Image: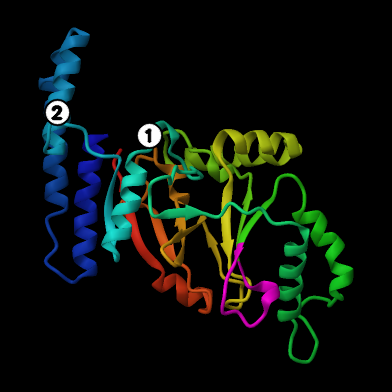
């Protein structure tokens, strides 16, 4: 994995230089040279070992050589950094988390950090207020809708059945500055998802087949099976500011507060951390995104990325 990191970093430097229109470092020649040196080490060093002790020694030496330091690399490194204090505060939280607990839906221990999670679980009334707001908002000015229009009182029983089952959990916090108090909330919906399960090592096609199988099994599992899956692999989250943007500003990830502002921790790409070729031109696996509740979601996505973190295999 240290060799994979080294190759990935070379790809990233090349891509980053092109984006900045700077002089790109070598790419093809560097990778060919790296591969030749690795194959030489395998044949001349590793394959000559005949004991576990020898293998342990040569692997430790090779990893130290590739990493440029004798001790293991930290689990995460900062990539994008638009707020040094915040980005490094999250880095500390990430790097104190055991590797075996990492995944696309990991819930971190934020004690002693400047971050806080939303812990207030909301009730049916909040679902109803939010859905009524969106229902009315999505009407056309002349009272028509792209779908056959139903009065909200007729639509709500179906929506309630959809959202108020045991596999969906609604958390939230009321915020100031909204014109409509019914929707003046930051909301986080947590639910079981196949995307929470980290896929095993394999090619993109192999992982795609496994993911489809997990998804099918979860669909057949029923409420008890879905909850069991979520307890083992975590709950996926989406965050919304219902009165913002045309789509209600839905973000993928956990809702976090830092100082007086709100952010989303998006770690969805951690579900493919074992892929040999995934994200070959990007180092980032975890993002902190700022919520702009009064900005259209398409615009806010372009401006929201504050920190990102590269996962060191």
Residue extending farthest front? 112
**Disc on the earlier residue, 1 or 2:** 2
Magenta range is: 173-185
Percent coordinates x, y for residue 35 in the rendering:
17, 38
271 sits to left or right of 148: left
91 sits to left or right of 241: left
Residue 277 visible here: no
Residue extending farthest top? 51
Which element type, helix, strand or loop, lies under badge 2?
helix
Q: Which residue is mark 1?
A: 99
Residue appearing at x 35%, y 40% in the figure: 276
Q: Which mark is residue 62?
A: 2
Res 173 → quadrant? bottom right
Name the image quarter holding the C terminus: top left
300 sits to left or right of 25: right
Looking at the image, is mark 1 or mark 2 nearer the viewer? Answer: 1
């Amino acid at each position: 994995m240290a060799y994979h990191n080294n190759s990935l970093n070379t790809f990233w430097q090349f891509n980053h230089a092109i984006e900045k229109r700077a002089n790109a470092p070598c790419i093809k020649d560097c990778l060919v040279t790296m591969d030749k040196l690795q194959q030489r080490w395998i044949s001349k060093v590793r394959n000559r070992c005949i004991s576990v002790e020898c293998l342990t020694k040569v692997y430790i030496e090779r990893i130290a050589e590739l990493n440029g330091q004798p001790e293991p690399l930290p689990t995460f490194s900062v990539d994008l950094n638009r707020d040094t204090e915040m980005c490094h505060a999250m880095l500390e939280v990430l790097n104190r988390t055991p590797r075996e607990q990492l995944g696309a839906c990991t819930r971190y221990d934020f004690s002693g950090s400047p971050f806080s999670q939303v812990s207030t679980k909301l009730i049916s009334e909040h679902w109803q207020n939010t859905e009524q707001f969106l229902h009315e908002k999505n009407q056309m000015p002349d009272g028509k809708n792209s779908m056959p229009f139903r009065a909200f009182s007729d639509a709500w029983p179906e929506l309630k059945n959809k959202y108020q089952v045991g596999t969906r959990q609604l958390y939230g916090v009321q915020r100031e500055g909204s014109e409509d108090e019914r929707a003046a909330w930051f909301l986080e919906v947590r639910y079981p998802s196949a995307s929470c399960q980290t896929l095993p090592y394999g090619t993109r096609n192999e992982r795609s087949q496994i993911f489809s199988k997990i998804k099918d099994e979860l669909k057949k599992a029923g409420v008890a099976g879905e909850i069991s899956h979520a307890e083992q692999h975590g709950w996926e989250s989406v965050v919304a500011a219902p009165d913002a943007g045309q789509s209600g500003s839905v973000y993928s990830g956990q809702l976090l507060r830092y100082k007086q502002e709100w952010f989303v921790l998006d770690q969805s790409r951690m579900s493919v951390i074992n892929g040999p070729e995934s994200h070959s031109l990007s180092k980032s696996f975890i993002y902190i995104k700022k919520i702009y509740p009064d900005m259209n979601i398409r615009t806010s996505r372009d401006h929201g990325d504050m920190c990102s973190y590269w996962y060191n295999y």
